[in-house]
Image (tube, rainbow, N blue to C red):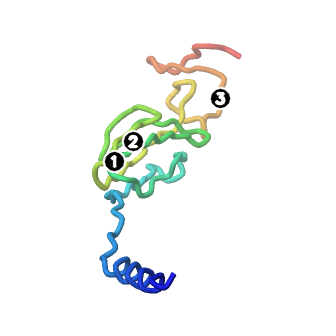
Amino acid sequence: MKHLPIYLSLLLFLGCSKEQETPSFDTYTKYDVAINFNPSYGGSVSPNGGKYDEGRSVTFTVTPSQNYVFTNWSGSESSTSNPLTIVVDSNKTLTINFEKKDTDGDGFTDDVDQCPRYLWRRTSRWEWLSRP
């Protein structure tokens, strides 16, 4: 019992004299994925871009607005796929392209079509493909 303070002092001295090792954490490079819309009101996407760890696989899903259809991706990636899956290996800028819907194929987009239920065809003159 008489030597206990000496042992405790030695233990404290030896325990504090060693340098503490700093734990190492794996660090990942983060890259930015920016999303643009053409036109800006053509639709939405989920997720809406952001910063992602290098090597991460990200899937983007497009939802067109009313009277629009998704046509393709352009920019850092080119594709007609929806959803689009990319591997983040650098900063990327993706543009989502839309066009106005022409459901009946008459050459007038749905937002201005006066006769959306009927089909027309242009030959030497306009003629009905289907009648009311």
Q: Which residue is mark 1?
A: 88
Q: Could you tell me if the residues under marks 2 and 1 are in contact, i.e. CB atoms within 8 Å?
A: yes
107 over 39 or under it: above or below: above
Please state the horizontal and vertical placement of residue 76, each as a whole percent of the image: 30, 47
Between 123 and 57, the residue placed more toward the observer is 57
Q: For the point 34% across and 73% down, which residue is it?
A: 20
Which label belongs to residue 110? none
Q: Is residue 82 left or right of residue 68?
A: left
**Viewer-side label of 3, 1:** 1
Q: Which residue is mark 2?
A: 57
Q: Real-space Cα distance between discs 2 and 1?
A: 6 Å
Structural crowding at the residue carrying mark 2, measured as other residues with C-alpha within 10 Å and reported as few (<14), some (14–19) or many (≥20): few
Please state the horizontal and vertical placement of residue 53, each as a whole percent of the image: 37, 53
Q: For the point 33% across and 59% down, which residue is it?
A: 27
Q: Secondary structure at mark 2?
A: strand
Q: Amino acid at mark 2?
A: Ser
Q: Amino acid at mark 3?
A: Cys
Q: Real-space Cα distance between discs 3 and 2?
A: 45 Å
Q: Is residue 27 left or right of residue 6?
A: left
Q: Could you tell me if the residues under marks 3 and 2 are in contact, i.e. CB atoms within 8 Å?
A: no
Q: Amino acid at mark 1?
A: Val
Between 64 and 120, the residue placed more toward the observer is 64
**Viewer-side label of 3, 2:** 2
Please state the horizontal and vertical placement of residue 7, each as a whole percent of the image: 42, 80
Q: Residue furthest right?
A: 132
Q: Secondary structure at mark 1?
A: loop
Does label 2 or label 1 sit earlier along the sequence?
2
Which label belongs to residue 115? 3
Structural crowding at the residue carrying mark 3, measured as other residues with C-alpha within 10 Å and reported as few (<14), some (14–19) or many (≥20): few
